[in-house]
Image: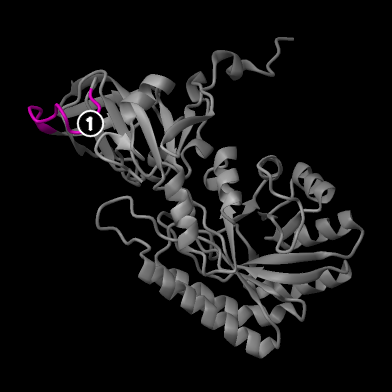
């Protein structure tokens, strides 16, 4: 939630850069809370923390009534550290995956974490580890998928995710052999799907859920709600969200009538809660021409924000002149240029302005100068969580703005952090 020009949640960006350095991720806590409230019609909102697993974000979600999804032992440990209970009804933490690595299986058993199985082998491994008894839910691949990019499509025959819909009888047989009750059905077809495709999920789950037997009590609509990165892209408005809930609620009620019992309805957003709440603040460090291209090079690279290099993802950008508190101030005399924005890495793909095929594109920005700040918007989801130490670069700092103040919620890594755990034999 941006405040006036040059501010994030009414805190001047120049002050954030001065106090915390660059590159830095900045999260607006109020924007996340607003998104949580928008989905309050669902019985359970379960945050898919892989989008952004900072402890401050997890704590904020917990304090405002969201539960959490985990896809690794590390994410389970994060959820516990953020104050989520290991067990409860509904389960505060659910482990959702297509495989159990050994660490995750041990962690799930140790803490009694609820499990959402995405493959038949997971059922056997869990049943053998528990010694029989207990309950699981199933993530079902309905045979179709959709996402903002082919790499974020999580349904259909080309996706590794979920139990193939034709294999449900086999999954039921495996669960029975281990004395496991199947208590829930989950379906997620992709990140950034449009509402038309998301609506098809309700019909698919309504058709398939009755196969799961008499212990079913939870339906999960998954996530994937659209987030507008460009002006004019489809957004989830209060009206479309209300319509989406009514669609799922109607499917739930028909299933309740058919099965003769109440069903809990969950939704599992990740990107939707945090994407627009995050801004990456980075500094312009060089400006140069290469043939017909005008390059603006900043101190953040694809080690900091991988989405453009990985998906050709677009992020809105704006310029804040050095020594200015207001974006736009001091830009009146600067002409607008078509520029290529890149980072500091020794890698040709370290470009923030590229398309899905990896081709360089340009973006209009006022003529930049060294020392200006570049603000990259909609960076709260899959920004820090996908960042790396490529080129031995320290990962960025993270700041959360709450109550009109900027709080450091992750310190910038140091050179010592980069080498922690390494040994020369």
Q: Which residue is pictured at 88% across the width and 69% down the height? A: 179
Q: Residue 158: image x %, image y %?
A: 53, 60
Q: Is residue 334 magenta?
A: yes
Among the 4 quarters of the image, the one containing residue 178: bottom right
- Counting labels gives 1
The reply to whether residue 368 is visible in this rendering is yes
The C terminus is located in which quarter?
top right
Q: Residue 95: image x %, image y %?
A: 69, 53
Q: Residues within 10 Å of mark 1 (few under 14, many from 20)?
A: some
Among the 4 quarters of the image, the one containing residue 423: top right
Majority SS type along the magenta span: loop
- Describe residue 114's horizontal placement relative to residue 288 as left or right: right
Q: Which residues are magenta?
A: 324-336
- Describe residue 30's horizontal placement relative to residue 136 as left or right: left
Q: Which residue is pictured at 53% across the width and 39% down the height? A: 385
* Residue ranking furthest to the right: 131
Where is mark 1, residue-wise?
326
The reply to whether residue 54 is visible in this rendering is no
Taking 342 as reference, is 42 above or below it? below
Q: Which residue is pictured at 47% across the width and 27% down the height? A: 396
Taking 51 as reference, is 425 above or below it? above
Is residue 31 or residue 289 the one in the foreground? 31
For mark 1, give the secondary structure: loop
Q: Which residue is pictured at 63% across the width and 62% down the height? A: 162
Is residue 63 or residue 229 the one in the foreground? 63
Q: Is residue 375 magenta?
A: no
Q: Residue 183: image x %, image y %?
A: 74, 71
- Describe residue 210's horizontal placement relative to residue 333 as left or right: right
* Residue ranking furthest to the front: 403
Q: Residue 182: image x %, image y %?
A: 76, 71
In this picture the colour scheme is one colour
């Amino acid at each position: 939630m941006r405040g006036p020009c040059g501010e994030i949640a009414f805190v001047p960006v120049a002050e954030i850069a001065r106090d915390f350095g660059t590159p830095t991720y900045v999260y607006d806590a109020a924007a996340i809370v607003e998104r949580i409230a928008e989905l309050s019609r669902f019985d359970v909102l379960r945050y898919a923390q892989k989008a952004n697993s900072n402890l401050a974000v997890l704590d904020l979600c917990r304090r405002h009534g969201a539960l959490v999804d985990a896809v690794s032992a590390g994410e389970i440990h994060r959820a516990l550290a953020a104050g989520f209970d290991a067990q409860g009804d509904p389960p505060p933490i659910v482990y959702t995956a297509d495989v159990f690595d050994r660490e995750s299986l041990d962690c799930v058993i140790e803490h009694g974490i609820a499990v959402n199985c995405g493959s038949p082998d997971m059922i056997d491994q869990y049943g053998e580890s528990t010694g029989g008894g207990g309950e699981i839910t199933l993530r079902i691949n309905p045979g179709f998928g959709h996402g903002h990019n082919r790499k974020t499509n999580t349904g259909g025959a080309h996706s590794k995710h979920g139990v193939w819909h034709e294999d449900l009888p086999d999954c039921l047989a495996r669960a029975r052999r281990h004395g496991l009750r199947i208590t829930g059905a989950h379906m997620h077809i992709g990140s950034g799907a449009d509402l038309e495709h998301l609506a098809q999920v309700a019909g698919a789950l309504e058709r398939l859920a009755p196969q799961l037997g008499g212990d079913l009590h939870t339906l999960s609509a998954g996530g994937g709600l659209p987030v507008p990165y460009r002006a004019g892209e489809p957004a989830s408005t209060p009206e479309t969200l209300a319509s989406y809930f009514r669609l799922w609620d109607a499917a739930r009620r028909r299933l309740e009538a058919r099965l003769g019992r109440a069903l809990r309805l969950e939704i599992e957003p990740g990107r939707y809660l945090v994407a627009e709440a995050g801004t990456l603040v980075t500094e312009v460090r060089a400006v140069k021409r290469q043939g017909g291209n005008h390059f603006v090079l900043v101190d953040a690279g694809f080690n900091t924000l991988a989405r453009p290099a990985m998906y050709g993802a677009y992020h809105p950008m704006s310029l804040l002149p050095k020594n200015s508190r207001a974006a736009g101030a001091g830009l009146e005399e600067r002409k607008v240029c078509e520029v290529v924005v890149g980072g500091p890495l020794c890698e040709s793909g370290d470009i923030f302005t590229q398309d899905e095929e990896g081709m360089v594109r340009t973006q209009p920005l006022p003529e930049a100068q060294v020392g200006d700040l570049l603000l990259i918007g909609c960076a709260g989801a899959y920004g820090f969580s996908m960042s790396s130490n490529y080129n031995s670069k320290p990962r960025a700092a993270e700041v959360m703005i709450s109550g009109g103040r900027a709080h450091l919620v992750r310190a910038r890594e140091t050179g010592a952090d980069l080498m922690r755990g390494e040994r020369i034999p």
